Image (cartoon, rainbow, N blue to C red):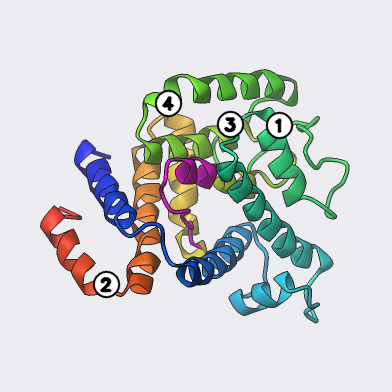
Amino acid sequence: MSNKQFSQLDALKGKLDEYRPLAAEIVSNLHESLVLQWTYHSNAIEGNTLTLKETKVAMEGITIGGKTLREHFEAINHRDAILFVEDLVTKQQPLDEYTIKSLHQLVLKNIDADNAGRYRQVNVLISGANHKPPQAVQVPEQMEAFIEWYTSDAQALHPVERAARVHGEFVKIHPFTDGNGRTSRLLMNLVLMQSGFPATVIEVEQRLAYYEALDTAHCTGDYSSFIALVADSVKRSFEPYWWALGIEAEMESYLKEMGYGS
């Protein structure tokens, strides 16, 4: 990622800020769509088989035939975790061990009570990845270092790069037995939202490129592909706002003027 690309994202944020505060009905409509899309895609990446419409129904508390109880809880839990993230943003809660464990506890609520909100006690391998997470005994120390890095060196990074690296470094440690992917994407959006950017959705159709970019970052330390993937998702996350505000054509011209993609 170049400084130019980060500047383009800053310009999009500045454009959206010109329209803030948004009308309540726009906020409500966008929020409902975001929660559904974010929940569906984040769960689908991890193998949940609920469709987008089934996810919506499950979040309303309706049971879907042929689907597991776990899949229903994953939808409900993820919605609740998003609401918790939004509350953390409102309260300006720092990213710390309490935040991380509380989020994870919500992700695994009614699914795995023994491990929800608790660092793993066993060594794990990530299926299909070359990177091997640290041994369980190293997790508390590495998580402490991760939080220390976030509160110090990470603050000098552009918010989009900071969010991407928070996601990547968290998953590299893989501190929990299950739910690391969902928790990492929630943390990524916590960082973005705290900096005034819209929450972004990594789509299930991007899964292969997403996993490959993460594995490259973990094995080589080269985060460029992963940061670019996150940045592209952030750019896309502005589009529902332009549609809701009725300025899609204006923004298309604005993007061309900025030389987006060049």
Q: Earlier in the sequence, mark 2 or mark 4?
A: 4
Asked if residue 15 is among those painted magenta in the image, a careful observer would answer no
Q: Mark 3 points at which residue?
A: 94
Identify the residue at image location x=45%, y=59%. 206
User: Of marks 1 and 4, which one's residue comes earlier in the chain?
Assistant: 1
Q: How crowded is mark 4: few (under 14 residues within 10 Å), some or many (20 or more)?
A: few
Q: Residue 248 carries which label?
A: 2
What is the secondary structure assignment of the residue under circle 3?
loop
| Secondary structure of residue under mark 4 | helix
Against 47, residue 191 (above or below) is above
Q: What residue type is labelled 4?
A: Gln
| Residue 128 in view, yes or no | no
Residue kind at label 2, given as amino acid type: Glu
Look at label 3 and name its amino acid.
Answer: Pro
At label 1, the amino acid type is Tyr
Between tags 4 and 3, which lies in front? Answer: 3
The residue indicated by pointer 1 is 98
Rendered residue at 32%/50% (across/down): 13
Count neighbours of disc 1 (C-alpha within 10 A) and say few if under 14, some if 14 to 19, many if 20 or more: few
Question: Label 1's element?
Answer: helix
